[in-house]
Image: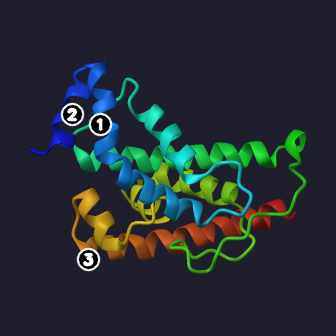
Amino acid sequence: MNDSSHILGAIGQGDPRVAAQLLPLVYDELRRLAVAQMAREKPGHTLDATALVHEAYLRLVGDQQFDGRRHFFAAAAEAMRRILVENARRRHSLKRGGDRQRLDLDREQPVEVERGVPLLALDEALDRLESRDPDKARLVKLRYFVGMTVEQAAETLGISVTTANRWWSYARAWLHEEIRRSEDVSDR
């Protein structure tokens, strides 16, 4: 058992003193994930990768329990997603200039959606996928928000690469259709 797994177990048992010991052990990997995620954001974003790591970490070491590194990094992916979505919602609100242009998604991003689809539309579609199929939604979060490859996501989820590829193909198609359908409804 490596140090981070031991510390994650201690955090799960309610020992708040060990939370400070965890950050140096996982910081580099969390920072790499945050840098990959922030590379997809528009320039001039109010968050930077360091702030994203720290905010996600603060959310993670609260009352949550982890069943090892996989669970911790999956929870980190979810925390980063929520932080970025909350930030997008704040920016989108009229009070904070919500009439600004839509966020363009880069074609090279793992979830292949049409250009001009805002993060909020993707998040809403992802929430619908999660209520329908949580495993596929977790795969999308790991690929899209954390930037993992299919192989890395498969390992994190404890599934085969073949299954991950099959789930990924389904999830991409399903999300694309959901986003298209929601745009059609909003255009009416």
The mark lying in front, picked from 2 and 3, is 2
In-front residue for pair 168/152: 152
Considering every residue shown, the one lying at the far front of the view is: 24
Q: Indicate the position of residue 149 as horizontal and vertical percent values.
A: 37, 72
Q: How busy is the neighbourhood of tag 1: few (under 14 within 10 Å), some, or many (20 plus)?
A: some
Secondary element type, mark 2? helix
Q: Indicate the position of residue 14 as horizontal and vertical percent values.
A: 27, 19
Q: In which quadrant is the C terminus drawn?
A: bottom right
Q: Earlier in the sequence, mark 2 or mark 3?
A: 2
Q: Tell me if residue 56 comes above or below residue 158 in the rendering.
A: above
In-front residue for pair 158/60: 60
Q: Is residue 28 left or right of residue 125?
A: left
Q: Is residue 63 left or right of residue 96?
A: left
Q: Earlier in the sequence, mark 1 or mark 3?
A: 1
User: CB under 8 Å between callouts 2 and 1?
Assistant: yes
Q: Is residue 90 left or right of residue 3?
A: right
Q: How busy is the neighbourhood of tag 3: few (under 14 within 10 Å), some, or many (20 plus)?
A: few
Question: Badge 3 is on which residue?
Answer: 162
Residue type at the position of mark 2: Ile
Question: Badge 1 is on which residue?
Answer: 22
Considering every residue shown, the one lying at the far bottom of the view is: 107
Q: Indicate the position of residue 13 as horizontal and vertical percent values.
A: 22, 22
Q: Is residue 145 visible?
A: yes
Residue appearing at x 56%, y 80% in the figure: 108
Q: CA gap, disc 2 to disc 3?
A: 32 Å
Q: Which of the labelled discs sits on residue 7, or is there none?
A: 2
Q: How busy is the neighbourhood of tag 2: few (under 14 within 10 Å), some, or many (20 plus)?
A: many
Residue type at the position of mark 1: Leu
